[in-house]
Image: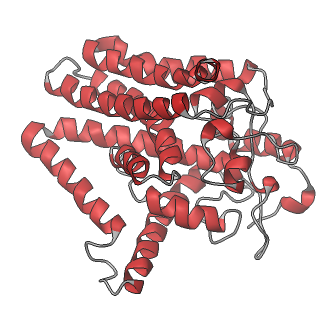
């Protein structure tokens, strides 16, 4: 019982989805709820939050795994209520787009973070739940790219998900989003060639995902309306940009030479408790890269890892201002030897 109670802190990750579901069902200014919660309350809390470097004491996975199942359920419900709210005209006019924004923020915070944890699990059921979460934001190819490319090539010039030194967030978005899709597509093609299947046929996971995603958009347009389809696509875009913002700050400027094993020094970490408990310990990113299959509630903090100035929420507005971001990150860089272009 003590173990389950100690892990109940991860239920904090569900707050954005609860706000979103309420907003989508109530309409009007309520649709702005998660925007305010994420970009005001969480940002301020994250910048003021204390760090907790305590090593995990309880290893029981019952509550952490239950929270992941809840995350899939709430993520799905948030998107379903967005579609329903617009179609039923509960959400209308400009609030359609504020609802899409709030829903997309939840998809990035809860949906994709839960998916990231789930796709690393060895259980096929858990992996499929992760793929479902990614599919709901039209980023299913992340299943291939993240596991088979990013974790292998992190910190090198061959990794489209590693941000280079003095690369702005905006440049990174333009490079990494198409780069990761192409990388996933080619990786899946190579896997199919080895199995004597058509490289870009239906056996290719990324090809299959794109076809299904196009079918979903077409179905939303045909059976509901172009507005519903556009709002759904809008929340996908918000979630994707938020995911790639996280990728940006996780490895910015850290370089790994060819042949060097991925170490604790190749990822930025943060022990700010706000980010830790709402993002499934993603901020203990160095430990995650040391052993990708390690459950989130068992991740540890490492003294050898470079430390972000603030948590993931606290860094958001700073990352939007490249000169300020560069200045703060230069001060936090562990050594000059690691500060150079990949």
Asked whether, in this view, residue 105 is left or right of residue 315, the answer is left
Q: Nearer the viewer, residue 172 or 23?
A: 23
Image vertical order of residue 186 relative to residue 268, above or below? below
Please state, as top left, top right, bottom left or bottom right, where the C terminus lies in the image: bottom right
What residue sits 75% from the left and 57% below the top? 165
* Residue 52 percent location from the top left of the image: 78, 26
Q: Quadrant of residue 317?
A: top right
Q: Residue at x 58, y 22 (%)?
A: 4
What residue is at 74 percent from the left and 18 percent from the top? 48
Tally of marks: 0
Image quadrant in which the N terminus is located:
top right
Give the residue furthest to the front. Answer: 1
Q: Residue furthest left?
A: 223
List x then y, in percent, for residue 268.
75, 46
Foreground: 317 or 199? 199
Q: Is residue 66 left or right of residue 129?
A: right
Residue 97 percent across, percent down from the top left? 32, 29
Q: Is residue 330 above or below residue 179?
A: above
Residue 134 visible: yes
Residue 245, horizontal then vertical, whole percent: 58, 44
Q: Is residue 254 left or right of residue 236?
A: right
Residue 100 visible? The answer is: no
> Residue at coordinates 50% horizontally, 18% vertically from top-left?
36
Is residue 193 found left or right of 319 in the rendered image? left
């Amino acid at each position: 019982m003590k173990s389950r109670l100690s892990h109940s802190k991860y239920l904090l990750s569900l707050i954005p989805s609860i706000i979103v579901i309420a907003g989508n069902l109530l309409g009007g200014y309520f649709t702005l709820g998660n925007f305010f919660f994420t970009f005001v309350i969480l940002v301020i809390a994250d910048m003021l939050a204390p760090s907790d470097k305590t090593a995990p004491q309880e290893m029981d996975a019952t509550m952490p795994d239950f929270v992941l199942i809840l995350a899939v359920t709430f993520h799905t419900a948030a998107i379903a209520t967005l579609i329903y709210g617009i179609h039923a005209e509960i959400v209308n006019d400009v609030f359609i787009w504020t609802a899409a924004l709030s829903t997309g923020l939840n998809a990035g915070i809860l949906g994709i973070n839960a998916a990231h944890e789930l796709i690393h699990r060895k259980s096929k059921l858990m992996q499929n739940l992760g793929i479902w979460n990614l599919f709901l934001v039209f980023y299913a190819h992340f299943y291939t790219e993240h596991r088979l490319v990013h974790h292998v090539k992190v910190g090198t010039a061959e990794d489209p998900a590693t941000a280079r030194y003095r690369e702005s967030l905006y440049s990174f978005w333009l490079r990494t989003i198409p780069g990761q899709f192409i990388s996933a597509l080619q990786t899946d093609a190579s896997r199919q060639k080895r199995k004597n299947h058509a490289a870009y046929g239906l056996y290719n996971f990324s090809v299959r995902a794109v076809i299904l995603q196009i079918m979903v958009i077409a179905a939303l347009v045909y059976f509901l309306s172009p507005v519903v389809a556009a709002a759904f696509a809008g929340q996908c875009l918000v979630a994707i940009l938020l995911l790639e913002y996280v990728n940006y700050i996780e490895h910015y400027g850290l370089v790994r030479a060819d042949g060097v094993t991925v170490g604790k020094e190749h990822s930025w970490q943060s022990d700010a408790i706000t980010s830790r408990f709402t993002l499934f310990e993603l901020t203990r990113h160095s430990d995650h890269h040391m052993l990708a299959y390690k459950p989130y509630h068992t991740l540890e903090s490492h003294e050898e890892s470079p430390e972000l100035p603030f948590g993931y929420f606290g860094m958001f507005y700073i990352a939007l201002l490249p000169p300020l971001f560069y200045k703060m990150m230069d001060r936090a860089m562990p050594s000059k030897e690691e500060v150079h272009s990949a």
